[in-house]
């Protein structure tokens, strides 16, 4: 094709990136319904038409699990939505979840070639569209499972990592039992991420699919308490165990006043609201406090979820208190934007020094220091440094601490031979193999990487399933000495 | 699902004290003295932590005992033999540190007598001389007397109003044992209302008698994931559900703990009012 002809070719009218329909910001800031309502079919087709079907697409390289993005978008353009979903499911078990919660702007959409000159293709929204399409219209069969191998695998923890591993292992013909400490399966997807961002019905649907495939999910089983991992293998006959119990232990700041009434971990606040549905108290029996002036300390997804939950419970002033600047906020871009529209106030470059209480032991304020950004630290982000004499007090009646989580020590205490890293996570040969220092025991997800993302936890579940299958066939293990 | 095999109403006074024997074979097998379960009653229920008061590993049963003080426990009290509890998770928490100490005094106040029972049993089985002190507001509210007699070498009882045995508090009895009777005591284990545990510790501290207190804080998950149960012990924040429930009683900040326990009083009151209305309607 000569250049002349190319120039003469009428240019396709440029379709702009399709905006995500959402509830009005004022209205949604007071309800728990989903913020975004999802693309219509027309929008999805328009957005799919923006994909230029690159010969060498970069988007797939930006996806932690390598979804064949180009093909699934091509199938959307052909209106073959279930085909598109099938394409995604070749690499990811939970598209309805990941379409909603993945940080696409740092992954696939960050490297999208259309995005070099224009706005990138809205890959996440399209992923969500096909998953919701199936949710609404049905269709798509249960996956075919290989004939039974007679092998039994125990999965500890029913978060995204465990659910993914259970799915893959069942397809491979192994009998899987998932042990979950809480009374609902889903991990962070049910106790952490709020309904307004991820409707729980979606997670329930995925769990039902697993059960229909023959996965047994045992709720209220805290492994290490009711049974140890050794008991699972020696007494109950499990041939391998996949440990994916998350990184759920909340950190507190270690500042004075942190045990005052009105100070919560984000995990507590969110668990009450999401898992226990305390936002609907007293129809649900678990209570939650409704505060007027709430500060959430932290800047990640968890912090955004907590602050927006506080707002929905009726807070007049809901603040994010974060010690770096807006550019460093680790939360998904969309969540920060939504929070801002809903009226969340960002108290940036601010670090708490102590929580102040009243005579009855309740929070009345928080003393903070102003920060400025200094030299970059190990993470490459500029280190916040306190400004001398910049102390000031925020008047508050609640402080929600959301500065991260670490690993629960329980399984280490009860599992001899399970190695632990310096940071307290489970030691593995590699994140690829998921093999721990204990023969037959694999680990992945947040308990290996530290708090990360749903898609990485799912990817780990995939890797684990592949390696467990191999181990069940050849019985080979590694040793640290030879590694 | 866990069937209620037996229901016993220990006291019909308001608030009622009720015991369920539950079918829970795996929990019964794993249970050690001092551990608790979290139960949820129904789709809209809350997670209620209750200490295991007794177990029969062979029959595969555990006993839980509760006072109907809140809406959730009132509704729990409406359940009957043959009904099934939706969720029971456990055993949770660290078991009591049991070894041969010598003379162990096990103190239970009110419904706290029930959770002290398996500890007394275990201490006796480990070769200790077990003296138990049971305290109740009045005779009718005293529970588990026979069980405690079987689990102890000696039982002493106090009631606030003097309606049964000695009039007074468990602390009076303990003080008498230490200061008047001069009984050498190697360990005290106490479970009851926080104020009682605080004062028991005040009695034992000057005599340097090691004292375990089992704390009953507010909990949500009971697995170490939320920190709702946190207390200050020896200046450090601890999670009762995973680091406890038992701690060195002399190190516990009881005042902070009591303040934290009052967090949801207004909500609880509201829930109780609604619950009472509902029960009137259904009655
Ligand atoms: C509030 C919040 C918001 C988030 N938002 C996002 C987001 O927008 N995008 C994103 O990509 N990621 C987000 N994340 C992170 C993401 O949810 C996690 O990285 C992911 O869920 C980790 O999956 P997992 O399967 O490893 O562990 P989890 O999801 O933590 O699941 C572990 C499960 O194991 C259970 N368990 C623990 N101990 C035991 C035991 N001893 N026995 C049995 N079961 C046990 C737990 O109860 C839990 O159900 C968020 C996290 C939180 C808390
Ligand atoms: S109850 Fe949640 S950490 Fe103890």
Image: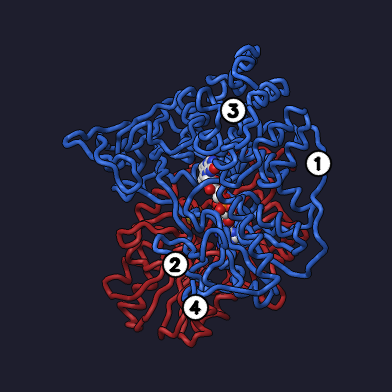
User: Disc 2 and disc 1: Cα gap in Å?
Assistant: 52 Å
Q: Quadrant of the N terminus of chain A?
A: top right
User: Disc 3 and disc 2: Cα gap in Å?
Assistant: 56 Å
Q: Label 4: few (<14), some or many (≥20) within 10 Å?
A: some
The residue closer to the viewer here, A424 or A287, is A424
Residue B159 in view (yes/no) = no
Q: Earlier in the sequence, mark 4 or mark 2?
A: 4
Chain to which mark 4 belongs: B
Chain to which mark 2 belongs: B
The label shown at residue A140 is: 1
User: Disc 4 and disc 3: Cα gap in Å?
Assistant: 76 Å
**Residue name at image x 53 percent, y 62 percent:** B111
Residue at image mark 3:
A121
Q: Quadrant of residue A22?
A: top right
Residue at image mark 4:
B155
The image shows residue A245 at horizontal and vertical percentages of 56, 58
**Residue name at image x 43 percent, y 72 percent:** B189
User: Disc 3 and disc 1: Cα gap in Å?
Assistant: 26 Å
The label shown at residue B246 is: 2
Same chain check for tags 4 and 2: yes
Chain to which mark 3 belongs: A
**Residue name at image x 49 percent, y 46 percent:** A268
């Amino acid at each position: 094709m000569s250049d002349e002809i190319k120039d003469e070719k009428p240019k396709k009218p440029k379709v702009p990136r399709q905006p995500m329909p959402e509830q009005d910001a004022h209205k949604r800031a007071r309800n728990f319904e989903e913020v975004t309502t999802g693309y219509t079919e027309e929008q999805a087709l328009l957005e799919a038409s923006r994909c230029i079907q690159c010969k060498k697409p970069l988007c797939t390289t930006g996806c932690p699990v390598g979804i064949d993005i180009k093909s699934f978008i091509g199938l959307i353009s052909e209106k073959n939505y279930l085909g598109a979903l099938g394409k995604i499911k070749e690499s990811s078990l939970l598209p309805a979840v990941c379409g909603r919660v993945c940080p696409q702007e740092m992954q696939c959409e960050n490297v999208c070639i259309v995005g070099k000159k224009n706005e990138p293709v809205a890959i996440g929204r399209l992923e969500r569209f096909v998953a919701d399409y199936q949710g609404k219209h049905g269709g798509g069969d249960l996956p075919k499972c290989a004939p039974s191998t007679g092998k039994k695998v125990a999965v500890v923890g029913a978060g995204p990592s465990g659910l993914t591993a259970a799915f893959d292992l069942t397809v491979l013909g192994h009998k899987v039992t998932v042990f979950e400490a809480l009374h609902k399966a889903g991990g962070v997807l049910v106790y952490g991420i709020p309904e307004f961002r991820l409707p729980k019905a979606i997670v329930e649907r995925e769990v039902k699919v697993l059960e229909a495939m023959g996965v047994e999910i045992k709720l209220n089983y805290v492994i290490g308490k009711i049974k140890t991992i050794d008991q699972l293998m020696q007494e109950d006959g499990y041939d391998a165990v996949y440990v994916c119990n998350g990184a759920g232990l909340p950190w507190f700041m270690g500042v004075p006043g942190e045990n005052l009434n009105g100070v919560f971990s984000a995990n507590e606040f969110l668990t009450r609201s999401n898992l226990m549905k305390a936002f609907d108290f007293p129809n649900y029996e678990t209570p939650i406090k409704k505060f007027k002036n709430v500060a959430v300390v932290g800047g990640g997804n968890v912090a955004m979820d907590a602050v927006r939950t506080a707002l929905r419970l009726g807070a007049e002033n809901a603040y994010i208190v974060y010690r770096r600047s807006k550019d460093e906020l680790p939360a998904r871009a969309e969540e920060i934007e939504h929070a801002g529209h809903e009226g969340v106030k960002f108290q940036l470059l601010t670090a708490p020094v102590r929580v102040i209480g009243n005579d009855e032991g309740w929070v009345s304020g928080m003393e903070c220091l102003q920060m400025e950004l200094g030299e970059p630290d190990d993470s490459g982000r500029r280190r916040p440094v306190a400004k001398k004499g910049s102390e000031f007090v925020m008047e508050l009646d609640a402080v929600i601490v959301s500065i991260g989580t670490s690993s629960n020590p329980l399984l280490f205490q009860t599992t001899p031979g399970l190695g632990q890293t310096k940071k307290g996570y489970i030691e593995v040969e590699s994140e690829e193999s998921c093999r721990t220092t204990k023969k037959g025991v694999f680990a992945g997800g947040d308990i290996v990487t530290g708090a990360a993302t749903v898609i990485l936890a799912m990817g780990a579940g995939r890797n684990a399933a592949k390696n467990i299958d191999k181990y069940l066939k050849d019985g080979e293990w590694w040793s640290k000495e030879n590694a | 699902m866990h069937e209620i095999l037996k229901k016993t109403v220990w006291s019909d006074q308001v608030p009622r004290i009720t015991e369920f024997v539950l079918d829970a074979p795996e929990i019964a097998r794993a249970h050690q003295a001092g551990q608790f379960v979290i139960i949820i009653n129904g789709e809209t229920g809350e997670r209620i932590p209750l200490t295991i008061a007794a177990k029969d590993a062979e029959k595969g049963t555990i006993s839980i005992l509760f006072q109907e003080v809140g809406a959730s426990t009132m509704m729990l009290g409406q359940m009957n033999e043959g009904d099934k509890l939706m969720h029971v998770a456990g055993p949770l928490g660290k078991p009591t540190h049991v070894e041969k100490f010598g003379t162990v005094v096990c103190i239970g106040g009110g419904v706290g007598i029930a959770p002290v029972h398996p500890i007394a049993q275990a201490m006796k089985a480990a070769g200790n001389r077990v003296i138990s002190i049971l305290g109740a507001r009045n005779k009718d509210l005293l529970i588990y007397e026979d069980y405690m007699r079987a689990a102890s070498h000696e039982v002493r009882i106090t009631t606030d109003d003097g309606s049964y045995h000695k009039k007074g508090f468990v602390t009076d009895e303990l003080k008498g044992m230490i200061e008047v009777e001069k009984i050498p005591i190697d360990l005290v284990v106490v479970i009851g209302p926080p104020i009682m545990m605080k004062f028991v510790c005040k009695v034992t501290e000057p005599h340097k008698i090691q004292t375990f207190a089992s704390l009953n804080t507010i909990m949500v998950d009971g697995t170490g994931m939320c920190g709702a149960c946190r207390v200050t012990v020896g200046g450090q924040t601890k999670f009762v559900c995973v680091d406890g429930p038992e701690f060195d009683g002399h190190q516990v900040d009881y005042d902070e703990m009591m303040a934290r326990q009052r967090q949801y009083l207004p909500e609880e009151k509201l829930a109780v009012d609604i619950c009472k209305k509902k029960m009137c309607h259904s009655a």
